[in-house]
Image (cartoon, rainbow, N blue to C red):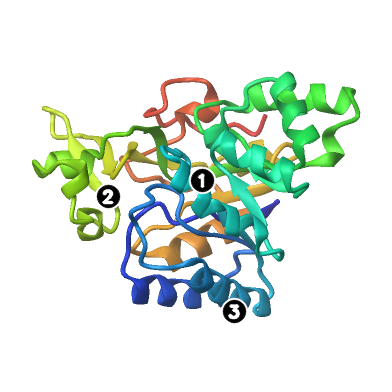
Amino acid sequence: MQLSLGANQYYWPKQTIEQFYRDIADSPVQRVYLGEAVCSKRKELRLSDWLAIAKELVQAGKQVRLSTLALIEAPQELDMIVPYLEQGELVVEANDIAVVQLAKEHKLPFVAGSALNIYNMTALKRMLDAGMVSWVMPVELSRDWLKGMLEQATAEGLRQRFDVEVLGYGHLPLAYSARCFTARSLDRPKDQCKKCCIDYPDGRLVKNLEDKAMFVLNGIQTQSGYCYDLSNDIASMQGLVDWFRISPQSQQMKQVIDHIWSQLASPQQQTLAPDHCNGYWWSVAGKELVASSNC
């Protein structure tokens, strides 16, 4: 199993982003996703900037891929993505079915992101026929479900055509909406948001009446309030998962990466924080924290 870093879900200043990926160049992460995957208004970096970062990461020995929006709301947003496909160097992660169609038309390989909601072999075959080379499992699905899907893929001689990536650490992207909930929480309309997401480098936490983490507001994206953490479940992923994905965060990224890297090399049971969870992996409520099983 190898280690990947998903696209940054939050809105950071350009200098912060550039420094973040300079640090990643010296990390044990082997695959890095770059690009804006949440909101088209977030334009701190242009495609040329992302490609410059990608060049540095490739020189550092990383495999780099470009991520695209998970909710395309207008033709001009789709037009913005076309150059990502035409840059001719990096594989693109498709998080909206419209990008899958573009990749198919351009006869280009692509990563099927978790937002595509591929739940069965029929959908998986369609993605393979369109050019999929990597598949990120939908975040709300379980180990048992993945095992069953891959057994079907093996039986049909398809398993070797793609690798499997699972989000193993980070706040789960649960939903996308045309409404910007961060702006709404500040009593601003979406078209006058003033890009307020940049004031919340890890999203805006929402707590329930019991003062427990409920959700994280991240622009048009709603995330889990708890941090999804499969670092104790790596043994159960062996033989199923090719890439363990970490989602970027603004603080303690080096510690998180080093911890997961050491777990991949030699899995050991650790005490997880009370606001961490792994329920979806074990087919229970997502916010639950289930004791690991070697399966």
Residue drawn at (37%, 62%), measured in percent from left and top? 43
Left or right: residue 47 compared with residue 17: right
Estimate the x, y position of residue 253 in percent, counting from the top left. Answer: 42, 64
From where the camera sits, is residue 198 visible?
yes
Q: Is residue 201 above or below residue 19?
A: above
For the residue marked with disc 3, what is the amino acid? Glu
Q: Which residue is mark 3?
A: 56
Query: In which quadrant is the C terminus drawn?
Result: top right
Residue drawn at (32%, 34%), measured in percent from left and top? 178
For the residue marked with disc 1, what is the amino acid? Leu
Label 2: which secondary element: loop
Q: Which residue is mark 1?
A: 78
Among the two numbered marks 1 and 2 on one chain, the one whose residue lies closer to the N terminus: 1
* Real-space CA distance between mark 2 and mark 3, rounded to the nearest whole angstrom: 28 Å
Left or right: residue 282 compared with residue 135: left
* Real-space CA distance between mark 1 and mark 3, rounded to the nearest whole angstrom: 27 Å
